[in-house]
Image: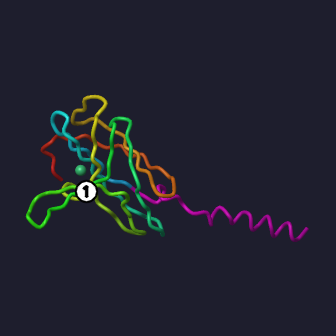
């Protein structure tokens, strides 16, 4: 009988020990899309803050609004030309932050399924390495938005 009571008490502690998913550790802020004219790809930007005690690894993203969402990194090569490369993952370190901002990491958004205008909200879902997901509303801003 006494053993059962001890076991019951131990069971109540178990939920505290359960780990948060990678998506649950992430707080997203300042999510926006720079809309470009015609069918030019749009850039998606967001600040990702990892409030957890382990790394969160972003592996892909998708949206019902865009046919293609890719994780890219812009940089300037040694000759001063701007280049972009595709990333297969992006690590947000424990207690750290990664900024997706113009001229750096960004989401490359292509094949919009309907016309968008500044002020619209677009949901984009981030997929993490542990299989968890985080849906974030992005605010559509005009082409001349920079910050
Ligand atoms: Cu890109």
Q: Which residues are magenta?
A: 1-27
Horizontal arrangement in the rendering, residue 11 relative to residue 47 (left or right): right
Horizontal arrangement in the rendering, residue 3 relative to residue 121 (left or right): right
Residue 96 magenta:
no
Residue 117 sits in quarter: top left
Task: Give me the residue at 21% from left, 36% from top.
Answer: 118
Horizontal arrangement in the rendering, residue 24 relative to residue 43 (left or right): right
Residue 11 magenta:
yes
Residue 50 sits in quarter: bottom left
Relative to the observer, which residue lies in front, 133 or 136? Answer: 133
Task: Give me the residue at 33% from left, 44% from top.
Answer: 69
Task: Give me the residue at 86% from left, 66% from top.
Answer: 4
Q: Residue 47, relative to residue 145: is it above or below?
A: below
Query: Where is residue 12 shown, x and y percent of the image?
Result: 72, 63
User: Could you tell me which secondary element the residue under label 1 belongs to?
Assistant: strand
For mark 1, what is the residue?
85
Query: Where is residue 89 shown, x and y percent of the image?
Result: 38, 59
Q: Residue 135, relative to residue 4: is it above or below?
A: above
Relative to the observer, which residue lies in front, 9 or 130? Answer: 130
Q: Residue 12, relative to residue 143: is it above or below?
A: below
Query: Where is residue 25 shown, x and y percent of the image?
Result: 46, 60
Quick one: which residue is furthest to the right in this view?
1
Label 1 crowd bin: few (<14), some (14–19), many (20+), radius 10 Å: few
Number of labels in the image equals 1
Quadrant location of the N terminus?
bottom right
Task: Give me the residue at 13% from left, 57% from top.
Answer: 82
Principal secondary structure, stretch drawn in magenta: helix
Within 8 Å of ligand 1, the CB of disc 1?
Answer: no
Q: Name the image colouring.
A: rainbow
Query: Where is residue 96 shown, x and y percent of the image?
Result: 37, 68
Horizontal arrangement in the rendering, residue 109 relative to residue 3 (left or right): left
């Amino acid at each position: 009988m006494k053993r059962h009571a001890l076991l019951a008490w131990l069971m109540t502690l178990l939920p505290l020990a359960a780990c948060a998913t990678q998506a649950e550790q992430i707080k997203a802020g300042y999510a926006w899309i720079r809309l470009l004219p015609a069918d030019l790809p749009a850039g998606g930007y967001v600040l990702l803050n990892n409030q957890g005690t382990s790394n969160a690894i972003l592996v892909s993203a998708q949206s019902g609004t865009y046919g293609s969402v890719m994780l890219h990194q812009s940089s300037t090569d040694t000759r001063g030309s701007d280049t972009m490369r595709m990333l297969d993952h992006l690590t947000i370190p424990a207690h750290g932050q990664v900024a997706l901002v113009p001229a750096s990491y960004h989401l490359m958004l292509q094949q919009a399924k309907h016309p968008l205008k500044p002020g619209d909200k677009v949901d984009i879902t981030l997929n993490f390495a542990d299989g968890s997901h985080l849906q974030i509303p992005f605010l559509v801003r005009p082409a001349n938005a920079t910050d």
